[in-house]
Amino acid sequence: MKNILIKTKGKLKKQTVRNRYFVLLLSMSVLPLFLLGFISFQIAKNTLIQNQLKTTQEHLRTSSEVADLLLRNVVNMERLIAWNKEAAQELKESAVQRTDKQAEIFNEDTPKQLRNMLSSYLIDTQDIDSVCIFNRDFRSFCYGNSGSMGDFDKNKVYSSVSGSDWYKKTVKSNGKPLFFGSNVLNNNSVSTFSSVKLLKDPSNLIRPEIIGILVVNIKTSLYTKAFNKDQNSYLVIDSSGTDPVTVYNDSPRMLPIVNQSEDLPSLINELQRKHYLVSQYSNQTTGWTFLHLVPEKALVSQSNQIGLVTAFISSIMAFVALFLSFYLSGTLTRPFLQLKAMAMEWGKGVGAWASDKKLQHDEIAAIGSTFKQISEENKDLNQRLIRSRLKEKEAELSALQAQIKPHFLYNTLDLMYWKAIMHENHDLANMSIALSETFKLSLNNGNELISVSKELEHIQHYMTIQNMRYNHRFCYLHTVDSELMDKKILKLLLQPLVENAIYHGLEPKLGEGTVSLHGAIRDGFIIFTVEDDGIGMEDLSITESGYGLKNVRERLALYYGPSSELGIFSKANEGTKIEIKFKEEAGMMSNVESSNI
């Protein structure tokens, strides 16, 4: 693609201005028309898809409500059985300890009475395939279609039920009916699914004991009644476990996709990849997901008609645009050809074009009339450029000298330090090393940001020098949170505040004085406080005239924005406190280190 563009650009450079304008106008008219047609087609297609999704979503909601109505009939039947005192009595009596010879069977009257009760409740329920009741010893009897009950219709004890997952979930539900996506009694029965309810003694409502479990196997044809039969496909997926279980599927061609999917999201993604529009709805009673599948090709047939009409109209408009582009390209390039002739005459020094009356009122003629002025200004600009380059060289030399001076100063202070050590003048040695470190930290290799720990080190060296000057009159204390030590802040943000406290607070005071610095993070703000016990002040307006605080305030606002604050609190003869507050992330120059500002 890149090579094609390069070749096209090279061919256009060789063409005349008219041909270039022709191609430009053609691309500005024809291409947007085809783009418009494509966009129209996509809008029509997307509108149809959205309308279809909205309609199917409403259908799914209605189908879910119908299914809820049918499933609630099953739940109501389970509740009637659970509340039946005669059934509860039969279950309790069947669990009474018996001899080994009697252990394999119920009392002859018990199964007969329970069957009569179930048949009376099932008389109007067409969607129930079979029902099994287990007492607390897991002795069972069943009623209904033996094909959905497996081996559980033999009237025996099935202690293995206690170890099954479905039984554990039922006990954990504490009496709430549970729905399982498959038949818990017979995995080979693909046309039924189960609802299981824990049975408790209804005669003891305070602390009812478990007397058995009720398993109702429901026909999947229940969902055939709930869904509207059309050309589309419906799925009911139970995704409550580790693997999704297909409860209902009216389209056999979906089986490979469903069987290969690990979970519900991967199933939906695979269906969409197979060009199906998927609508889903969560059923209230079971919590299962209803899916409605529509092939995309069934929807785009109407949008294809719109695409054909749009393509026809676009073709007619493109033909008109082709003719207009050819005509307009000649009209637009004619003045430029005249301008070319005038420029060539000006280059030869003729200048006769200025008296051409035909172009006196033409915009392009106005462009030509500026050639002479541009030529004169060009000479002046060349001279300015030469002077600017000379000044740039001088600035580079000054910058080089500025780099040399600090090194010269460091070397001199280092020499002074070692001379003082040799003469055992430790005060002078300490002052020399403190001054050297102060200069290094102030320059900070040209970077505007410095870590809090280095800024504190800078202040410590500064206080060393001041205490030597003033015979150790000043006590400096700092308490800064450890999490602040590695934070980056503007350099010389705290040192001027300490210096201000020395010169204006403690130096005029008689005797010793203390300056303290506190740093912490509160509510997303970094807060530093510099406090002294000096002479204080009554009129805070005098702080505006000083350079140090004014400079700190301006730099703070410039870098950290309007959310930053600098507050001054002072009282005569008691001291002064200065507090700065800013958000770390509010810096306007977050990349200042990398750009060496």
Image: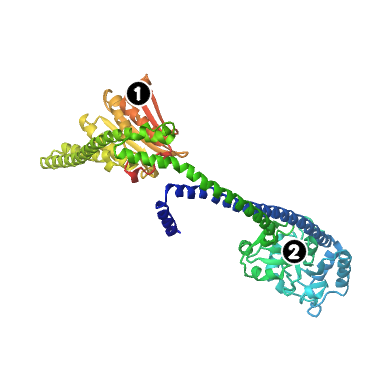
Any part of residue 564 in sight: no
| Horizontal relation, residue 474 to residue 302: left or right | left
Number of disc labels: 2
Q: Position of residue 595 (x, y in %)?
A: 34, 44
Coloration mode: rainbow
Which residue in the structure is indicated by mark 1? 543
Relative horizontal placement of residue 180, taking residue 332 as reference (left or right)? right
In which quadrant of the rendered image does the C terminus lie?
A: top left
Give residue 298's position: percent from left, percent from top.
69, 61
Q: Of helix, strand and loop, which one carries label 1?
A: helix
Instruction: Using the image, determine if residue 84 lies above or below residue 448.
Output: below
Q: Nearer the viewer, residue 9 or 111?
A: 9
Amino acid identity at mark 1: Thr
Residue 541: image location, x then y, percent: 37, 20
- Residue, far bottom: 101
Q: Which residue is mark 2?
A: 231
